[in-house]
Amino acid sequence: MPKILRPLEVYGVLPQTNCGECGESTCMAFAAKVADGVVEITQCRPLFKDPKYKSKLQKALEVTRPPVKAVTIGTPPYQVIVGGKRVMYRHELTYHNPTAIAIDVMDDVDADPLIKRAKAIESYTFERIGQQLRLNLIALRYVSGNPEKFAKAADVLSKNVSLPLILCSYSPDAMEEALTVVGDKRPLIYAATRNNWKEMLDLASKYKCPIAISSPGDLNTLKSLASTFISTGIEDIVLDPGTFVRGDSLAETINIFTMLRRAAIEKEDKSVGFPLMAVPAVVWMDPEGDEVEKKMKESYVASIMMTRYADLLVMHSFDPWVLMPLLVWRQNIYTDPRVPPSVKPGVYEIGKPTDVSPVFATGNFALTYFLVRGDIENAKIDAYLVVADSEGLSVESSVAGRRLTADKFAEAIKSSGLNQKLKKKVLVIPGRAARLSGELEELLSGWKVLVGPRDSSAIPEFVEKVLKKEMESA
């Protein structure tokens, strides 16, 4: 079983002065948040700044280090943290530091198309349940064979986009040429291998950059190289055990990633306790299959590897239909299972509601809220949306479990102030809460309670066929 960090373990290595510099009232409160992964131990300023706590600092770093080390790529405020895992399965605690997704660019193209693709990668975003889903890094591939061109491309990227870089080359000469230009940006060096590890180790040490160790299919060499790097004091390491996708080899890839993560967390093997990197872009090396097939394969390989412990993905495809499922899946995996995604209960205005506008009601599960809100906006109607506390559960689940009741809806309405504000009091409750309508009308004197559609996508039709007539007669 994985070792779970306990608040008392953290408290034991803190100054225990209750100074409040971390933002918490006591060291114990801070320790609880560190153990929970909500804050970092680095926020204890006295521990890191006061020399008298030097011995405690070393113990604190050792105690709080997760089995899978957290590695930072890039510099503030545009850095990306990968790894930092404490558990094998998210339901055991939760996952932190969502899998970072990089899209590749080539160094053999002119500056204009290079900048265009890089800016498109940086600006790619879409909103889901109140969160902006984005890509995280740009992987610059050395395909020109010209170190100066590689360095120039790295320079162009660093001056035109803010995303952290992965410099992809097995050539130490090309890598050093690029690092002289962008080394201060802390790019990820990809990669050290059994053939170039000495030169790459020197570069990682000189420029203080994180480095990936690559040994496809050879875990003994991967572990040996990692141990060598650790012995020299370099621990900002990412492991690339290889991504094989043809035939049964994909199953073997999944097995390798699982073994490495299990060795790090359950067996506490520090030589492999680092973030894992997968490269779904390798599907483009397969001569078989057309372009659409390869894009689809890259998408599902990326989803599988994210599920099976990849902390960093490098992809080539940039089509929305390839990336959107992956970003949504990442959001789902990295949602804390202990805390359902929810919004604050209360009343929200949609459009410009007046004293004769209708009132819709729903629960505070985030996905429900944003779907209902979007569908009311699509109906092009000014309205109030009252969000009752359903404890972060869907309407159907919370009504069935008696966590969302007529009393809660009534209390939400009464505390909203709408009783005094509205001349026409028409409330639309979700179709999946229809059983509450009778009781709710009794609790809300003077209100007309309508049962809306079971699916919020039918709200526009409901507004046209039912609600407008009811508002006129109210």
Image: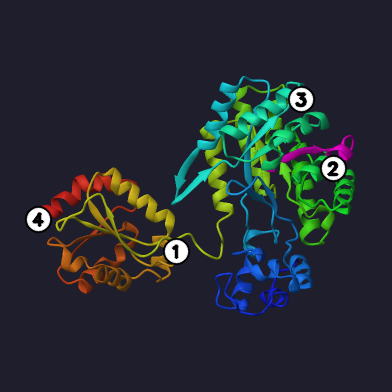
Tell me the kind of residue under disc 1.
Gly
Residue 451 image-quadrant placement: bottom left
Element type at marker 3?
helix
Q: Which mark is residue 473?
A: 4
Q: Nearer the viewer, residue 441 or 152?
A: 152
Give the magenta-colored segment's residue range. 186-200
Mark 3 or mark 1, which has the lower sequence index?
3
Q: Which residue is mark 2?
A: 201
Q: Is residue 46 visible?
A: yes
In the image, taking residue 358 as reference, residue 130 lies left or right, namely right
Front disc: 4 or 3: 3
In the image, taking residue 175 as reference, residue 75 lies left or right, namely left
Q: Which residue is mark 3?
A: 147
Tell me the kind of residue under disc 4.
Ser
Q: Which residue is mark 1?
A: 392
Q: Is residue 395 magenta?
A: no
